[in-house]
Image (cartoon, grey):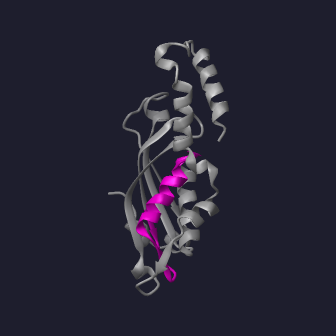
Amino acid sequence: MDKEKIVFHIRGLLEAIGEDPEREGLLETPERVANMLEEVLEGTAYTNDEIAEMFGKTFDSPGKEGIDNTVVMRDITVFSYCEHHLALMYDMSVNVAYIPRGKVLGLSKIARICDMAAKRLQLQEKLGSDICEIISKAAGTPDVGVVIRGSHSCMTARGIRNVNAGTVTTTYTGAFRTNPELKQLIQFD
């Protein structure tokens, strides 16, 4: 990430909206924004393969393989930024499930994968696909389901300004595509 360019352009943005970047409250704003973007868009620096490798710590699966040994993690909190408006996607909750094929991921790794995939300019639909792909690669299984529920400030704070609007997206691979019982495991109530 080129923080110097970000500082330059944020300064120009402040001027373009009629602000004085030299006034007391804005003196350090370009640097603060550059630091914030480096943090909240950290996932931009990594491919899905690299994230799978970073958080791919696995353990031998304690149970037999199959649907009866499904791993489910619910209510993982993430936030991201919409690639269309750079608007915050918030109150996002991710449910993830997968069927182990001889190995299981450390539970914290599932949450870390969701967090890192969200730290990109995203669409909610793409975020679900990215998480699904990364979990599949990290856990070595084709059977993954991801359901995301979130609010988008491009809907709530601007445009239509519908503060109650929420979006739910689903991504299913392998057995999750055809098995309604598996899909039910990760649906929101």
**Is residue 171 something one can see in this rendering?**
yes
The x, y position of residue 179, in whole percent, is: 47, 73
Of residues 180 and 131, which is closer to you in this image? 131
The x, y position of residue 120, in whole percent, is: 57, 46
* Rendered residue at 41%/39% (across/down): 165
* Rendered residue at 52%/35% (across/down): 87
**Is residue 133 something one can see in this rendering?**
no
Answer left or right for 96 relative to 177. left
The x, y position of residue 148, in whole percent, is: 45, 54
- In the rendered image, the residue lying farthest to the left is 189
The span shown in magenta is: 96-124
Q: Is 4 colored magenta in this rendering?
A: no
- Does 71 sit above or below residue 31? below
Of residues 30 and 109, which is closer to you in this image? 30
Q: Total number of numbered labels? A: 0
The x, y position of residue 92, in whole percent, is: 42, 48
- Work out which quarter of the rendered image holds the C terminus and state it: bottom left
Of residues 107 and 66, which is closer to you in this image? 107
* Rendered residue at 52%/50% (across/down): 118
* Rendered residue at 43%/87% (across/down): 64
